Image (cartoon, helix red, strand yellow):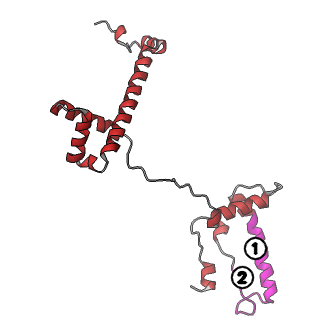
Amino acid sequence: MSKTSRANKSSFPGRYAGELATPIYEPVAGSVGGLGGSKAEAERRAFEQRLLKMDQLFDWYSINPGEPDAWMYLAVRLASEHVPGMQVRHKRRGRKRTWKDGLGIELIRDVDALRQSKKMNYEQAIKELQKNKDKWRTYTYSNLITRDREARRVEQRRRRLAEQLMASPLSQAMGSVFGAGLTDENSSD
């Protein structure tokens, strides 16, 4: 692609609108239909058109041109948008997560179901799950043991908090305000 054809194509289509999206067309000196004059005059006319568009550029980026550092703010905004080395990209560091949210609860359910049906301890149940269930094959035995323990702790903590909430005076008051018993003590059975 030649230098002249590259200048006419926007590298950032759709980013700007109106006059900011329209290139400045300045006839080359000496061409047919041109305004005449020298190349210096053509450069001066192009420069004047750029100056007219600068106010629109300040408006586009919501920068007050009267501020003391307005030109610096505009330069930073333009560089941040158009210069790859000035752009901030947020990238997660480290290994991609393989253990998705909610898998712990599923693991507990599967382990408990196996323990009830086959009368085995949780380590045997996890070993059985890893061998026979496609969902758990991708994880190592030690990983599943750890994840099961973590999920049981989280579940235990959640239950404890729920019990504390049910026993709190606030939940008692809320139950009486809304006419619903939030604890077993409020039921008439």
Helix, strand or loop at label 2? It is loop
> Quick one: quadrant of the C terminus?
top left
Helix, strand or loop at label 1? It is helix
Q: Position of residue 182 (x, y in %)?
A: 38, 15
Residue 26's label in the rendered image is 2
Answer whether residue 47 is magenta in the image. Answer: yes
Q: Position of residue 180 (x, y in %)?
A: 38, 14
**Residue 138 appears in the figure:** yes
The amino acid type of the residue labelled 1 equals: Gln
Q: Is residue 147 above or below residue 179?
A: below
Instruction: Give residue 122's quadrant in the image.
Output: top left
Q: Mark 1 highlights which residue?
A: 49
State left or right for residue 25 relative to residue 128: right
**Residue at the image point whose x is 48% and y is 14% from the top:** 170
Which is more toward the observer, 15 or 165?
165
Most extreme residue toward the left is: 118
Answer whether residue 115 is magenta in the image. Answer: no
Label 1 crowd bin: few (<14), some (14–19), many (20+), radius 10 Å: some
The amino acid type of the residue labelled 2 equals: Glu
Instruction: Give residue 57's quadrant in the image.
Output: bottom right
**Residue at the image point whose x is 83% and y is 55% from the top:** 68
Q: Which region shows up in magenta?
A: 25-54
Which is more toward the observer, 79 or 8?
79
State left or right for residue 175 relative to residue 117: right
Most extreme residue toward the top is: 188
Label 2 crowd bin: few (<14), some (14–19), many (20+), radius 10 Å: few
How many numbered marks, from 0 up? 2
| In contact (CB < 8 Å): disc 1 and disc 2 | yes
**Residue at the image point whose x is 45% and y is 53% from the top:** 95
